Amino acid sequence: MPPQSPPLKPHKPYFFYGHRKPSQNRPVVRGGLFSNRQTLSPKTPAATTTKPFHLRDWDPQQIPSQPSPPKPPSHPTLSSRLSPIARFILDAFRRNNRQWVPQVVAELQKLRRVTPDLVAEVLKAETDPHLASKFFHWAGKQKGYKHNFASYNALAYCLNRTSMFRAADNLPELMESQGKPPTEKQFEILIRMHSDANRGRRVYYVYQKMKRFGVKPRVFLFNRIMDSLVKTGYLDLALAVYDDFRREGLAEESVTYMILIKGLCRAGRVEEMLEVLGRMRAALCKPDVFAYTAMVRALVGEGNLDGGLRVWEEMRADGVDPDVMAYVTLITGLCKGGRVEKGFELFKDMKGKGFLIDRGVYGVLVEAFVAAGKVGSACDLLKDLVDSGYRADLGIYNSLIEGLCNVKQVDKAHKLFQVIVQESLEPDFKTVNPMLVSYAEMKRMGDFFKLLVQMEKLGFSVMDDLSRFFSFMVGEEGRVTLALQVFEELKVKGYSSVSIYNILMEALVGLGKVDQALSLFTEMKQLNFEPDSTTYSVAIICFVEDGNIQDACECHNRIIEMSCVPSVPSYCSLARGLCSIGEIDAAMMLVRDCLASVPSGPMEFKYTLTILHVCRSGDAAKVMEVLNEMMQEGCPPNEVICSAIISGMSRYGTLEEARKVFENFRERKILSEAKTIVYDEILVEYTKKKTADLVLSGLKFFGLESKLKARGSTLLSS
């Protein structure tokens, strides 16, 4: 029996726990999973009870609750793509509230050395440009350290990311001062940043700096510079860069020519564009159909239809056959530019070549024919569209219905409306509005009401559409009376609302018919309609025009009680009305209330507060400076401004200074002599009133009011 070997002693693994002793060049590193001898048991998820699913309880509209996605890391130090030392540096920034303080420098000095690649890694992850710049300069001062192109580029990206592109543009000078002259790559980075942000002038600035450093761009970079300048509207600068391009003896590419050609097309400089096109033909090749289509699109997009047709002829002369996109581009431009006949010729040419014509082309032609009053040609196009196997969309039908109503053929328009319903298209307000207007103009109210009933059956919001109908009617010249007549008949059928009353009242106020607007306001309240803030705002203007300031103030109070804000015109009207009856203090309070409630108050109210502030100096010359500035801004003095002068000078100035301002107005014929006399009387009365109020306030303050009353009663008894 062989001797048995002693049992093997089990290997006892050694686990390092705690943390290693820090040294000058090695930071504190904590242990990982085995940092101590405690057993780490995985956390078991708590058992969740799920409710059994029953089909009868299922709600298809209820979105099942899903676990929220994990939150992204709040700081780049948590990114697993960073190296441990980069995470240590960024964590040092975080622990010190992202400020460059001595504690941060002390943390960084624990590192043995810093490499340019590490600096670039930190700068790519850092979001604070000031902190990144401090770290960049600190790294450059370390012994034996020199920045490389990667660290400079990372700093440029960091500065540009935080919109400090002007500081990034100074990097070439920094590189040269540190013995690292910039190459074309550094300038290309700056140019690409500015180009992506559409900063054309900065692109040209970097290009000029590039020339000062003696760096010659490649053809690719020249193209990038010129393209950015053209896109941002600096065509002349792009042509200047092209002159430098030619002086350098570089050979143009097709991209170079196309950048200049498209820029010249957008600027409408067709002759210069043809000259560049000729050089392109002679030196390189003829443009293809895509290049010609781009030229046509650029010219037509700027409204230069003649230039687009001229390029079209050049394309034909070069033997380039236009494709569908070229035809569609030119036809669309011609139709929108009012030259539908030429567009229709191209359409027939396109159809003769057997191209597949999109329904959108038919729609553009139909709309253009309707706008030109050629409804018959538009209807022929609809027949051609249907014969070609297409189904007309709602836009085409809407254009045809509008065209037929314009030529007083509303019955044919209604037949087209029936076709829309049969084809299960969903008509909208634009479909029925031309028919409603035609029925109203032709006094065919029976058909008008039949159409309203049909609209209700189709699911239209009839009251909202009627409001839009009346808005359209009062927007057309001379149709306000017709709108009122239609509304009189609609009220009998129960088709009336607050919004319709508001629209008609605003239209009547615009025409100066205040009495009719007030009658509508009275009628509205008699029919138990609840006016809204718009109604009261219009009523304020009406009452002020009618001279009834008390009722206007009541309407203003009703708006405030509704927790709403009056309209700006009603504020202006009420302020002028209060000034006209001498209620200057109330008007000034209204001015302040308007500017506090309305995001963009009227200019006259803003200058009113400015005048009140300037009057504190008591100098008429300073007040005139503000008034001159106001008039230069196109805001002439009115009742509110004059009342502000009276209020300000009565409190802080003198009567003589206020009279100097009004006398200046009279000499410059801003105020008539009669108005000047009226304002002088108001000034005197307002000053007396304020003086009396001041005396009474003093008596109340010193407790002498009772003695004054006793003295007055004694005099009356005697």
Image (cartoon, rainbow, N blue to C red):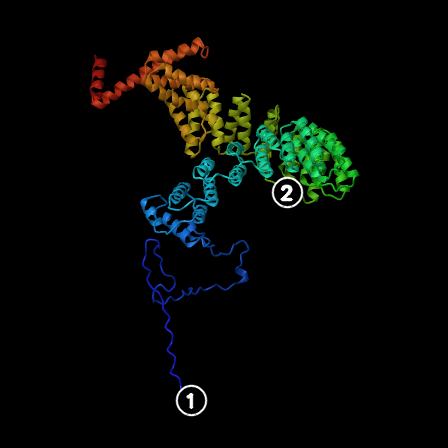
Q: Position of residue 496 (x, y in %)?
A: 56, 34
Q: Position of residue 325 (x, y in %)?
A: 70, 39
Q: Does residue 280 appear to the left or right of 158 in the view shown? A: right
The image quadrant that residue 6 belongs to is: bottom left
| Disc assigned to residue 2 | 1
Residue occupying the far right of the picture: 352
Q: Residue at x 42, y 24 (%)?
A: 606
Q: Residue at x 65, y 30 (%)?
A: 265
Q: Which quarter of the figure is the N terminus placed in? A: bottom left
365 or 210, nearer to the observer: 210
User: Which amino acid type is shown beneath numbered disc 1?
Assistant: Pro
For the residue labelled by badge 2, is the local secondary structure a helix, a strand or a loop? helix
Marked residue nearer the N-terminal end (2 or 1)? 1
The image quadrant that residue 409 belongs to is: top right
Rate crowding at label 2 as few (under 14), some (14 to 19) or many (20 or more) other CA atoms within 10 Å. few
696 or 295, nearer to the observer: 295
Residue occupying the far bottom of the picture: 1
Q: Position of residue 7 (x, y in %)?
A: 38, 81
For the residue labelled by badge 1, is the local secondary structure a helix, a strand or a loop? loop
Q: Are marks 2 and 1 in contact (CB under 8 Å)?
A: no
236 or 211, nearer to the observer: 211
Q: Which quarter of the figure is the C terminus placed in? A: top left
Residue that badge 2 annotates: 457
The Cα–Cα distance between marks 2 and 1, rounded to whole angstroms, is 106 Å
Q: Is residue 166 visible?
A: yes
